[in-house]
Image (spheres, rainbow, N blue to C red):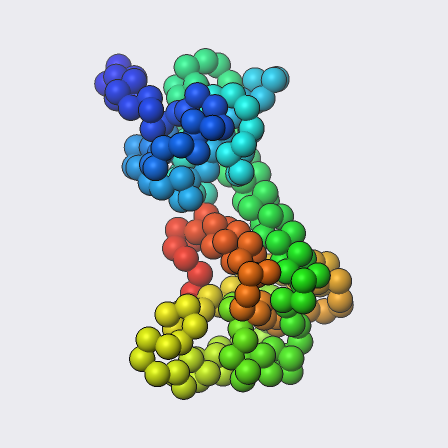
Amino acid sequence: MADLDHANAEPDTETDRGPRDGRAGPVRTCIATRRQGARETMVRFVVGPDGAVVPDLAARLPGRGAWTSLSRAAVATAVKRRAFARAFRREVTVDPALADQVDQLLERAALEALSLANKAGAVVAGFTRVEAAIAAGDVAALIHAREAADDGVARLDRALRASLSGYGPGNAPNGGELPILRLFTVEQLSLALGRPNVIHAAVLAGAASSGFLARTTRLDRYRTGDPAETV
């Protein structure tokens, strides 16, 4: 009973009345942990016509929305505790693999954004080209395939750190912190970039890369609870 009373005490942040309302408030409350966070650090869910809970990553689907923290653990906890039924105040169907569904959607969004950045000329691939981009100071993010050999990863990471150390205090790009991403397989990177055997890649600084960086930040936070490693 206490849980129900607590849920009813915060209907304005735990659920919303629709996508417009969902994007209006500055914070939302996670239905699994009760912790509040900015919308950018949360995931919205709605109930589909068949009564199934559906992830709404863009927070645009119609209908009442419920929110969890941007965390695999939070989504899994919401499923386990039947938090969606409580939040929506009705019986709903929840896929036991909902946390995996969210991961796959976040991953797909990041890879699609990488493909778009590549078409805009904002991605280079291959050890030599990545190394040259680092030396030129053009890199906004460094990408390694999950299968990448440790020695190649270490060499490029050191090169990126060295390139940033050459800037004066306060002058380094992005405050001197650039993400190093190891979120995707060789197959995924190769498909997104339209070339074979992509092991190392770099996203170049500029407007064309902003969408990819935003989506990978969300994917990494969902998987690890923390932003990607930076240098």
Image quadrant where residue 80 sits: top left
Q: Which residue is painted at 46% across and 83% down in the image?
A: 163
Q: Residue at x 59, y 60 (%)?
A: 208
Q: Which x, y percent locates residue 90?
A: 45, 13
Location of the N terminus by quadrant is: top left
- In the image, residue 39 sits, relative to residue 146, either above or below, namely above
> Which sits in the foreground, 120 or 38?
120
Residue name at image x 67 percent, y 62 percent: 120
Up-down relation of residue 189 to residue 52 (above or below): below
Q: Residue furthest left?
A: 2
Answer with left or right where residue 128 lies relative to residue 165: right
| Rendering coords of residue 196 (x, y %) | 76, 68
**Drawn side of residue 26 relative to residue 224, left or right:** left
Q: Quadrant of the C terminus?
A: bottom left
How many tags in the picture?
0
Asked whether residue 94 is in view, the answer is: no
Q: Compare residues 186 and 194 and report the one nearer the observer.
A: 194
Image x and y of residue 131, in percent: 58, 82
